[in-house]
Image (spheres, grey):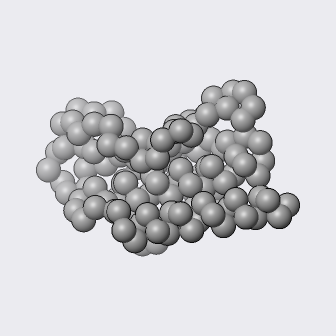
Amino acid sequence: MIAASIGIWLAWYGLSAWVESDVPEGEDSELRSNVQMIWTMEIAYGYANGHYLAAENAQDLKALGWSPSGSLQGNYSVTTTSGIPGDFRARGSGDLDGDGVYTVYVATKSQGATLLVEADSGLSE
């Protein structure tokens, strides 16, 4: 129990430092920072529960304890793989500046938020 609490605190502290120092300014900063937050919450959840939590949308992500500030413009989800503890893929996407170009950030157990693609509006959500 104490180890899980310490792990969650360290994950939160690390995210706080990352958000304060490394989130880019601009239209995609919501996507990147939220995917990084989801990644941190999944790592802590997996450490505490022995598996990761799948989520189809932002509402489902509340089970992780994720509660973004303000209104969301992007779409967020998490897929998981079987196994113990398995793996996960967090995804955030959207056309936040309205120019028809969708930005997609992904994160997995082994890598935090990474820009995956910027594509025209034909990208499926």
Please give the name of the residue rendered at 31% of the width and 48% of the height, measured from the top-left corner.
Answer: 94
For the point 48% across and 41% down, the residue is: 111
Residue at far right of view: 1
Residue 19, picture quadrant:
bottom left
Q: Quadrant of the N terminus?
A: bottom right
For the point 66% across and 67% down, the residue is 9
44 displayed left or right of 103: right
Q: Is residue 1 visible?
A: yes
The image shows residue 34 at horizontal and vertical percentages of 44, 58
Q: Which x, y percent locates residue 43?
A: 63, 49
Q: Is residue 76 above or below residue 8?
A: above
Q: Residue 48: image x %, image y %?
A: 76, 52
Residue 121 can be seen in this image: no
Q: Position of residue 22 (x, y in %)?
A: 35, 62
Q: Is residue 103 left or right of residue 37?
A: left
Spot the residue most to the top: 82
Total labels: the figure holds 0
Nearest the viewer among 87 and 102 is 87
Report the side of 110 relative to 102 (left or right): right
Quadrant housing the C terminus: top left
Query: Could you tell me which residue is drawn at 62 percent across and 41 percent down?
Result: 54
